[in-house]
Amino acid sequence: MSLAVVYSRAPAGIEAPLVTVEVHLSGGLPSLSIVGLPEAAVKESKDRVRSALINAQFDFPARRITVNLAPADLPKEGGRFDLAIALGILAASGQLPSNTLSHYEFIGELALTGELRSVRGALPVALQTREAGRALIVPLMNADEAALVNGVSVLGARHILEVCAHLAGRTLLAPHILKESLNNEAVADDLSEVRGQQHAKRALEIAAAGGHSLLMIGPPGTGKTMLASRLSGILPVMSEEEAIEAAAIASVSDQGFTVADWGKRPFRAPHHTASSVALVGGGSTPRPGEVSLAHHGVLFLDELPEYDRRVLEVLREPLESGRITISRAARQSEFPARFQLIAAMNPCPCGYLGDQSGRCHCTAEQVQRYRGRISGPLLDRIDMHVEVPKVPREKLRASSDETVETTQQVRTHVEQARVRQLQRNGKPNAALKNRQIEKHCRLSEADQGLLEQAIERLGLSARVYHRILKVARTIADLADSEDIHTAHLTEAISYRRLDRPITR
């Protein structure tokens, strides 16, 4: 038989569409051509495959070899098709039985010695292979990642000879079993280590419970970064679906995915010099950006006014929709971006506005210009603004009489509140739509008048009106209250600090 068909997968965002590798041997001068929209790395696979087969003691056919990667209009990239092409050549030349190839899918890059090297995106491939009802053969270095998907048989191999021995029925590869225990590490950074800042800790607990975005304003050294880094520890445990989505995004990114990170909420903290493409993703072959890598986790933007304003504006759409679409002339990719935004900033250019020492000499105009680097529409989309003032010296001592809660204690409260939300809405409060807000965030007549008065005095938008209601609903959930009471509403209104006039 001079024709062989092998199945593989191509990368396309966080998807892994099927690629049928067709290998045909015909008469004519010896050559190997690859068609089907291959990019440079795929075209170079003919040299890797040739050397790998020869060094593995196979005969490389001295015939005209045509390799078609179908569908022809799907761009192919990387060395992931090396293994499938090599097996197709062996099957088409009669050196390998072809009757079992249809039961498997193959990804893997070949070294010149025939060894298999890891590729990016093994987790999405395993998900798609499970839906197709086939087994998956991958390099051994990718086997742990692929084995995270339940319901698919994953076979890991070190060398192409091991794959050929399995297909020939001589030495079978055993299904890979994940040996490493998952997500069993204790939280390294505990919330109890943050001294003082009870108001900010309370805001952090509310943000975690309802999935709300949070902006912290305070002078340098007051614990804003410490508080932000503790948020992922008090968030509810990830569901299996959330863990798979987050891992799939990391798997297709340039940084890759490690099994030790399975089930851990992502925490991304890009530097303020990051570009808009770095935040939302892009490139000629679209890759996920920071907002997608923080999916189901935390995106922390420190020194928020120092970011380029055009960079910050790209956050507006994913904050609302939870997705980002990257369009290029050749292709379009969509990545999920349901992240929790936590930002921090100084109150003024020098950072010491309101400090009792009087060392701030910034004028009101300078402060306004500094805060004006953040647009009103973006501030509208941040649910909570909270002040993080200077901590008194006596509270910095480890022997302070202040009662502090640990990360585990706060997480217990957060999980209980989140369970109430999921039972009532099927989603966190931050994701409620207008109709659901009207249904679940009802106020008494007196409280409705109080909220309308606050909206009028502070000049708030309709978007902020709804966000205050959602935060108040979360505060009520933390208090195990079916209704939103006045105390819940007034606390929610207090978390709109930047909507008020500047005071010294």
Image (tube, rainbow, N blue to C red):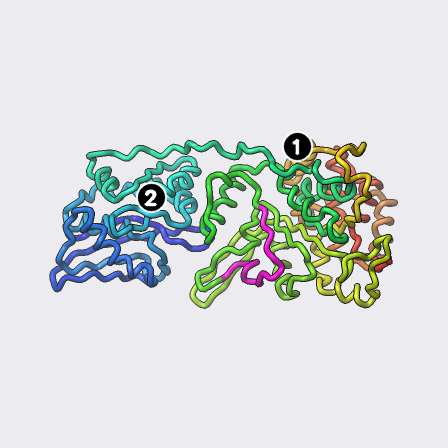
> Picture coordinates of residue 245 (x, y %)?
51, 45
Residue at the spot x=14%, y=50% of the render?
59
398 left or right of 255 in image: right
Q: Which residue matches tag 2?
A: 139
Quadrant the C terminus occupies: bottom right
256 or 243: which is nearer to us? 256
Q: Is residue 205 one of those drawn in magenta? A: no
Residue nearest the viewer, comparing 116 with 39 = 116
Q: Can residue 388 be seen in this view?
A: yes
Query: Tag 2 or tag 1, which sits nearer the N-term?
Result: 2
Secondary element at tag 2: strand
* Displayed quadrant of residue 173: top left
Q: Give the range drawn in magenta.
A: 267-282
Q: Quadrant of residue 412?
A: top right
The numbered mark at residue 408 is: 1
In the rendered picture of this protein, how many numbered marks are placed on residues?
A: 2
* Residue 466 appears in the figure: no
Q: What residue lies at 46% left-to-right and 45% top-to-bottom?
A: 257
Identify the residue shown where x is 25% and y is 40%: 162
Tell me the SS state at disc 1: helix
Query: x%, y% of residue 391?
Result: 79, 45
CA gap, disc 1 to disc 2? 39 Å
Towards the viewer: 164 or 126 = 164
Q: Does the magenta stretch include residue 281?
A: yes
Q: Amino acid under label 2?
A: Pro
Q: What residue type is labelled 1?
A: Gln
Residue 268: image location, x then y, percent: 58, 50
Residue 383 lies, in percent from the top left, at: 72, 51
Identify the residue at image location x=42%, y=41%.
Answer: 145
